[in-house]
Image (tube, rainbow, N blue to C red):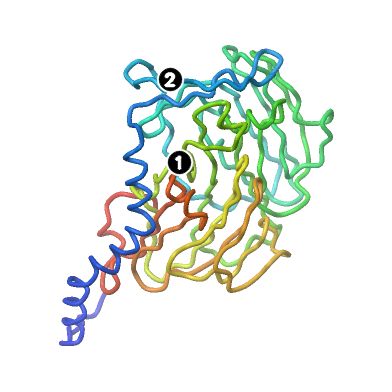
Amino acid sequence: MTPHTHTTSTERQRRVDFDTLAPLSIGAIIVAVVAIAIAIASHQDAGTVASAAGAGDAAATATSETTKAVDVKDVKPDFSAKEINPATEPVKAGPKTFELTATERKVKVGDKVYDQWTFNDQVPGPVMRVVVGDKVTIKIKNAGDSKLPHSVDFHSSRLTLGGGHVQVNPGDTGTYEFVAEYPGVFMYHCATAPVLHHIGMGMYGMMIVQPKEGFGADMPEYAIVQHELYASSKGIDDGVMDAMAFNGIPSHYTKMPIKVKKDARIRLFVLNAGPSQVSSFHVVGTVFDRVYEDGNPRNVSYGRQALMMPASGSGVFEFQTVGEGLFPFVTHQFNHAAKGAVGMIIAGDGKPGPGAIDEAKDGHH
């Protein structure tokens, strides 16, 4: 039972001050971090098609042709990009088997359609969690309608090019195994030549390898993959991205934010899948209590404002959302944030002061 509390004149004035000033203070954050990104994205040519098809022939040899944009009504996508719930939970030790299907699809992402190569019809591919010492079995299938061979390489494994990440032709399957030896946040990706194009088209994902004793205190955990979206094979070659995203859709978590209780302690698993840009991961309104570079607890630092992650670099970030309010997460490469590498964490009702998470309707909990 919750005891009745008396509202003092100071508290009433505080609420009045919030109602008056919040549009200025919170709005400033949104304008600086979120609204700019959305505005820029919304003013890009809506209803265009970004395509990097022709990034390889049957022998996986890339072309450098740029595909012209066409009106979205002239192109029928196979499906819209999946909205990825970033919440993730620890797993128990033991053998793990994962199945991946490589596909080549036209995918509607926001207002554009991209030719994407995917694992399990999503970009990024599914998050996988294992424990140090687990025997991991990977079963990969290449869809029968694919035009190219595909494969998958796990940075969490010790496998030579011939001993793992087998090349799988259209319609075929492959299997291989490894033991996860080190804790961390690892990238997996297609390792078929030209690798730049197979990653640039969308073939990547995250594997979390937990220490045997776990990552520490129990707290909400979320997995975030930062990556680039390209409009053409030339864009991939030149590193000129069409958009940036966390978990597939630019600025998605500004519209469907991550929602937590006030004063929440949070653990984020973050991977920069690239393939070509660095990330300076930062959460506005807090300081990282602990950061495990590459996700390994032995690579620990404290009181961090950001972590520079190269392509395929990663980190585990632990922090607290003190009080209630808005906590944007971005890459501090703000030209990339403006292209869509921006999201939002809402603590409580998003307002400093009294409130509850159940007052917020949409979002990821």
Residue 237's image quarter? Answer: top right
Looking at the image, residue 169 lies above or below residue 278: above
Front residue of 16/88: it is 16
Q: Residue at x 47, y 55 (%)?
A: 330
Q: Is mark 2 on a helix, strand or loop?
A: loop
What kind of residue is marked 1?
Ile
Give the percent coordinates (x, y) of residue 317: 57, 62
Left or right for 305, reference 183: left
Residue 74 location (% of width, % of height): 35, 15
Q: Which mark is residue 78?
A: 2
For image coordinates 22% across by 73% down, the residue present is 18
Instruction: Judge by depth and name the residue closer to the eye, 231 or 260.
Output: 231
What residue does disc 1 label? Answer: 84
Classed neighbour count for the residue bearing mark 1: other residues with Cα under 10 Å, few (<14), some (14–19), many (≥20)? many
Q: In this view, does 349 lie to the left or right of 215?
A: left
The residue that appears at 38% across and 49% down in the rendered structure is: 37
Above or below, 304 relative to 259 = below
Residue 337, x across and y down, in percent = 46, 51
Tag 1–tag 2 contact (CB < 8 Å) = no
Q: Horizontal and vertical percent for residue 245? A: 48, 43
Quadrant housing residue 187: top right
| Residue 349 seen in render | no
- The three-letter amino acid code for the residue at tag 2 is Asp
